[in-house]
Amino acid sequence: MVIRAMIEYFGSDIRRISHFLKVFGFAKSIADSENISAKELAIIEIAALTHDIGIKVSEEKYKSASGTYQQIEGPPVAGKLLEGLKIPKEIIDRVCWLIAHHHTYDAISEIDHQILVEADFLVNIQEDGLEEKEIRSIKNKIFKTGTGISILNKIYLCGN
């Protein structure tokens, strides 16, 4: 139901739809291997699908897709969408917190935040065409889960 709502939200913007679906796939893959609870999995899946929901408002309001603006504008939009889908309030609150912090990397302390950030990077590395040096730096600074590191290595660093 969240996937369909997000497709409706982004309409014909296939780039944004493809992005959140890829982030969702990586987030679910990492989460499935990291021994998390069912509630944490639900939060991660919903956050992965909605993490960039603020981009439309950011582009309209600020003429920018900056992560800073997305973190400001995303939670209110996501909250309204998720309330309409009858998602429990405590899950909505955590998803909105994750949206508001998914471009904040200096104080990651919870597994849902870590997995969302890693999944987003796994997609952004390809979409942004990053070079090996940048990828290694991201790996060393950001990645913490064994599964995320393994996926990053296999896809981008020839298994290293």
Image (spheres, grey):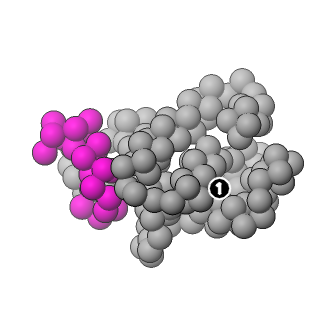
Q: What stretch is highlighted in magenta?
A: 139-160
Q: Which residue is drawn at 13% across and 45% down?
A: 160
Residue 49: percent from left, percent from top: 61, 44
| Residue depicted at x 67% and y 28% | 13
Q: How many labels does the image show?
A: 1
Q: In this view, does 68 lie to the left or right of 140?
A: right
Q: Is residue 100 visible in the rendered structure shown here?
A: no
Front residue of 155/41: it is 41
Query: Which percent across, then down, holds residue 44?
Result: 55, 53
Lateral position of residue 62 relative to residue 128, left or right = right
Q: Residue furthest left?
A: 160
Residue 158 vertical position relative to residue 112 in the rendered view, above or below: above
Which secondary structure class fits the magenta region best?
helix
Does the magenta portion include 150? yes
Dot 1 alpha-carbon crowd within 10 angstroms: few under 14, some 14 to 19, many 20 or more: many
Q: Can residue 26 be seen in this view?
A: yes
Q: Name the residue under label 1.
A: 70
Question: On the image, which quarter does residue 123 sit in?
Answer: top left
Dot 1 lies on which element? Answer: helix
Relative depth, front residue between 48 and 76:
48
Q: Quadrant of the N terminus?
A: top right
Is 75 part of what is drawn in magenta?
Answer: no
- The residue type indicated by label 1 comes to Gln
Q: Residue furthest right?
A: 84
Name the residue located 48 percent from the left edge and 44 percent from the top edge.
28
The percent coordinates of residue 21 (x first, y second) are 55, 34
User: Which residue lies at the image location 72% right of the left edge and 67% below the top edge?
Assistant: 90
Q: Is residue 66 left or right of residue 140?
A: right
Q: Residue 4: x percent and y percent? A: 73, 32
In which quarter of the view is residue 79 placed?
A: bottom right
